[in-house]
Image: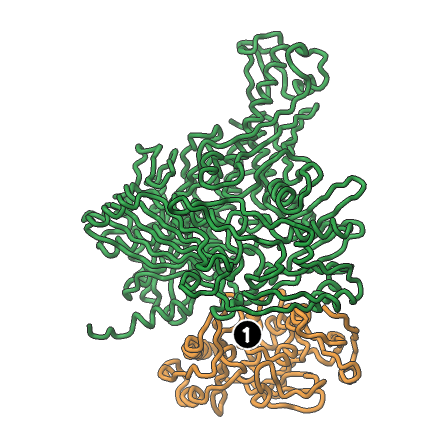
Chain colours: A green, B orange
Amino acid sequence: MGNVTGIGASILRKEDLRFITGRGNYVADIKLPGMTYAVFVRSPHAHAKLLGVDARAALAMPGVLAVLTGADMKADKVGGIPCGWGITGKDGLPMKEPPHPAMAYDKVRHVGDPIALVVAETVDLARLAADAVVVDYDVLPAVVGVLEALRPGAPAVFEDIPDNLCCDWEIGDRAATDAAFAGAAHVARISLVNNRLVGNPMEPRAAIAQYERSTDRTTLYSTSQFPHVVKLLMGNFVLGIPQHKLRVVAPDVGGGFGVKQFHYAEEAVVTWAARRLEVPVKWVSERSEGFVSDAQGRDHVTEAELALDETGKFLALRVSTLANMGGYLSTFGPNIPTNLYGPLLAGVYTTPAIYCEVKVVFTNTVPVDAYRGAGRPEATFVLERLVDVAAAEMGIDRVAIRRRNMIPTTAYPYQTPVMMEYDSGDPSGCLDRALAQADWDGFPARRAEAAKRGKYRGIGLATYVEACGLAPSRIAGRLGARGGLYESATVRVHATGDVTVLIGTHCHGQGHETTFAQIVSDKLGIPADKIEVVFGDTDKVQFGMGTYGSRSLSVGGSALAKSVDKVILKGRKIAAYMLEAGEPDIVFEDGKFSVTGTDRSLRFDEICLAAYIPHNYPLEVLEPGLEEQSFYDPVNFTFPGGAHVAEVEIDPDTGSVQLLSYVAVDDIGTVINPMIVAGQLHGGITQGAGQALCETAVYDDASGQLLSGSFMDYAMPRADIMPNMKIITHSTRCTHNDLGVKGCGEVGTIGSPATVINAVVDALSPLGITHVDMPAAPNRIWRLIQAARLPKAAE
Amino acid sequence: MQGFTYHRPASVADAVALLRSTGGTGIAGGMSLLPVMKHRLATPPALVDLSGVAALTGIAASGGTLSIGAMTRHVAVADSAVVAAAIPALASLAAGIGDPAVRNRGTIGGAIANADPAADYPAAILGLGATVVTDRREIAGDDFFTGLFTTALAPGELIVALRFPLPLAAAYAKFRSPASRYAVVGVFVARFADGVRVAVTGAAPSVFRVADMEAALAARFAPSAIAGIAIPPDGLNGDIHAEPAFRAHLVGVMAARAVAAASSVAA
């Protein structure tokens, strides 16, 4: 196309200048006149009756304005934090939906459960006063693991849910699956854990709320991935504030990864406090506070089986998972291990029969919800580990068994047995490229060379497909979504031809200010620096559903494209009038409207001026102005997919696993900005490698304390554990949106845990080791090697 | 953080007097003290900033010893040509402490007075048989570390300098925690004319020597000399990253690596 700032260009990100020169505007940077500071008092116990809160000493301390409790909220008739997705279990039973008070008033259900808010003149004074609040607890036995929580007699997180079971969910055809297993030549089985993660975006959560009596308006600044939804949930269900009197602003936000994608109690408490006290109230989470209050990710225990015929063709897949919800339902919590997990178990394979059941379980831990990938990394991990296990047990090459079962390119659109219909894809093409780039065939020589140095070297492969671009509203509604999942974009063209885009998605690191401008630049033929992208302020932007589930480009970008098309359509009408031609004779190309077959044309900016100074203008049939709005509800999920290959080397003396190389070949549909895509993959792969190699949230079984409560114990991946990654896109267009885009925000995290662990198992397979749970950390690897080296007892 | 009075004396005597009169704490690099104060686990009424006391700085080698002032930053030890010539293993230990930001602020005196069970310098003090010179006496390295975060220093006693004998060969090998990057196990090995010293940090509540390994290495200074020596896991630290048995195993691995490194480079 030749547009240097259009689709496909790797232009530098517009937002980076302010971010890397310290000029971002984050919630913690905001100062309001008369602002006060708030600190939460949180439960140090995992499970306890809350008998009383004594704030007298705290209230007497200097600079303290108020100590507000859960009992105060209850007396004010504040509503509970709502759940945005209601799943239905077997036999049509709706999930159990216990109350989720914004601050506890009778019981605390996890370490970190908020009990009171201390508001003071400075944050130090608030902290000192919070330490002086005396809380009377009757400590109860706690339960932290899903297996323990389901045992008869386990402590009940909610008294009226004695078995701790939120929902017993299923998908697929149980009868067909069981029948296929009965006739299988081989059944491969695996038991595995998908370890709990703490998301740890670089910027901690924060909220500032302000009530202005003169306008009767309330404003909340929050580190949110979906400010419009916070406005709706908090305004309508929690605090009873009419929508037209409430503004929510999510300014610059330093990373979300799903952690900031929920309506949190802290948002409601800070807003309620600001309205009650009529002073602005500011809360900024401390990191150790975030460890016990940010929603956490994953935490599955799974038994899975794959039935194969004698040639290694997959006949059926059966999966049984226990998924930890934590102590309360978070906004999307129940949806993650069910609708975003079960329907992905076909992967890129033609498995004809699949059955998956998931028990969603309450425990005395921090609530669990979406974290980058949200259900799809868990599904990919189960499937790709099981495929490797089956290959090893049947003596079939790991690549060959995948090819034997792969969906052929001619079979798209492909209907899986678990609801999803994939529109397009080329899994064998991705696989071919990944194997070539990784020099798969040259690996045996590298393994032998490493062995000479006393190291175990392994190579791992995973293919995946995922479902994102959330979501077609009708399908989502049938699956239990309590909201719509469309997106909206207004394209406001100014008289001079500059453009402001107002879009309902939210950018917290993805580069939307750049990529959405590129889309507009491409279609309108104007440079990207004439296009401003605005999001995050509910007073400025029409309703949107925010950013998560890799939806911004496919859903938001599609709404944007529609609006730009409407602008062009109106422009053609104006141009036809001004050029005295028929509309069908007008061509719009390279930013110019011209009459076909002539040299008569008008530039885009000339049309814009005419729209706002309509002197030579078809006023009888066309309104002045040039601003178009669209709401777009997607036809289907989008289905990015790919193949990843990694190599590791293990030092048997220390159990250390070193990641030596990583190749990612991903089909993400049309690519807007290759540089930004590479960045998304770098970060996503690193997060998945982090889960595989070092990250894990550990709760003490007896006390429910979070043992990994800071970076001293929670091992984040650093740059020095990652090799340079080869990022390759191998795209097939999405067939159901005009841009042909699929999204790429989560694919790195979805493919990588299985890839890395498959490499680790491959490295240790000469020792007879067949599975390694995550994280593959030194102590665990050393133990496995020690056990494998013991002489086997005679059977 | 609780409020405190701040003092910046220019002499050791003034510093010692201020510590006595205020009941406060000395602050060196602050890399351990400030986080503890932010968590309100320590609330000293006063901080006596030692960075203004010139007598606490300086690196000098003379008469068969290397002397390092207590306020010498890790980066200065790591980059010092004097240390590189006298005890290169000490320079490389300092270069591996924490990260660049920590190394720019942290000090040898502060690290040793704090006696974190996972700190690196205590292994060097014990491994080299260094002397801790304070404002009022000299304490042998063997007598200095007495327990978890505990030393032989009296309240208000200030470390002034560390004095190291020069070994024939030395090396430090550490296995880092994947989370904190502190030493899960760190072993400092030093060979002298009259014997070998092996000091282990990270594995136990306080740094300790391994007599069996010292005897074996005195007879033959090679990794194979200690191959059969197993450290009992009893009393060793355990956490979610490394159980006691794993640490016991790592002591052997890191000791062998330190011996190999010391063998390949003369002190």
Task: Determine which quarter of the picture holds residue A577.
Answer: top right
Describe residue B156's horizontal placement relative to residue A356 as left or right.
Answer: right
Q: Which chain carries label 1?
A: B
Q: Check disc 1: other Cα within 10 Å, few if <14, some if 14-19, many if 20+.
A: many
In front here: A167 or A9?
A167
In front here: A1 or A714?
A714
Relative to B53, does residue B152 appear above or below in the rendering? Answer: below
Tell me where residue A795 appears, x and y as whole percent. 19, 72
Residue at 53% in and 9% down: A597
Q: Is mark 1 on a helix, strand or loop?
A: helix
Q: On the image, numbered disc 1 is attached to which residue?
A: B93
In front here: A179 or A540?
A179
Residue A2 visible to an observer of this rendering: yes
Residue at 41% in and 71% down: A654
Residue A690 visible to an observer of this rendering: no
Task: Determine which quarter of the picture holds residue B101.
Answer: bottom right
Describe residue A178's horizontal placement relative to residue A48 as left or right.
Answer: left
Residue sitting at the far front:
A160
Tell me where residue B234 appears, x and y as whole percent. 44, 83
Q: In which quarter of the image is the N terminus of chain B?
A: bottom right
Tell me where residue B116 appears, x and y as whole percent. 58, 77
Relative to A579, does residue A565 appear above or below in the rendering? Answer: below
